Image: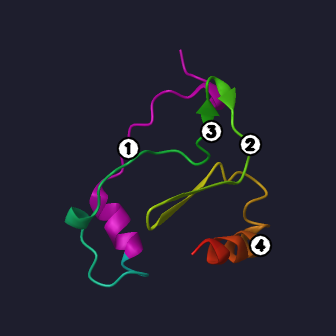
Amino acid sequence: MKSSPDKKSDYTIETPSQVFAEGLSKFIKNVRAEDLEPAYAGNRPKLYKNGAPCGDFIFLKEANVIHLLGMESPALTAAPAIARYVVKMV
């Protein structure tokens, strides 16, 4: 039985790293498939905390890393405002 998108449990990455490297090479010089490490697949991972969905726009700063979590729609529309907020965090 195939799972529905909101109940997806298999995020296996089947695309070879070389395909990603070729696409990235348009933006990052000398990137190689060996430089890439798979994390997860899927486009809209839903975040949950204690079994309840988290809201959009979670900003988490840990040392010198800023994590932007739960960026579902309207994140693209809000990208300039998100960028200004992150700049202030830096």
Q: Quadrant of the image for the C terminus?
A: bottom right
| Residue toward you, 76 or 55 | 55
Queried whether the magenta region covers residue 51, the answer comes back as no
* Mark 3 → mark 1, Cα distance in angstroms: 18 Å
Which amino acid lies under the numbered mark 3 shown in the image of this protein?
Lys
- Residue sitting at the far bottom: 29
Please report the bounds of the magenta region as a residue range.
1-24
Vertical arrangement, residue 90 with respect to residue 1, above or below: below
Residue 14 at what x, y percent from top left? 35, 44
Among the two numbered marks 3 and 1 on one chain, the one whose residue lies closer to the N terminus:
1
State yes or no: discs 4 and 2 in contact (Cβ < 8 Å).
Answer: no
Queried whether the magenta region covers residue 20, the answer comes back as yes
Which amino acid lies under the numbered mark 2 shown in the image of this protein?
Gly
Helix, strand or loop status at disc 1: loop
- Residue 81: mark in rendering: 4
Helix, strand or loop status at disc 4: helix
| Marks 4, 3: nearer the viewer | 4
Among the two numbered marks 1 and 4 on one chain, the one whose residue lies closer to the N terminus:
1
Vertical arrangement, residue 49 with respect to residue 3, above or below: below
Quarter of image, res 51:
top right
- Other-residue count near label 3 (Cα within 10 Å), few / some / many at <14 / 14–19 / ≥20: some
- Check disc 2 and report the residue beneath it: 55
Among the two numbered marks 4 and 2 on one chain, the one whose residue lies closer to the N terminus:
2
Left or right of 10: which side holds 37? left
Which residue is found at the position 71% from the left and 54% from the top? 57
- Other-residue count near label 4 (Cα within 10 Å), few / some / many at <14 / 14–19 / ≥20: few
Quarter of image, res 47:
top right
Residue 89 at what x, y percent from top left? 62, 71
| Marks 3, 1: nearer the viewer | 3
* Mark 4 → mark 2, Cα distance in angstroms: 17 Å
State yes or no: discs 3 and 2 in contact (Cβ < 8 Å).
Answer: no
| Residue toward you, 82 or 18 | 82
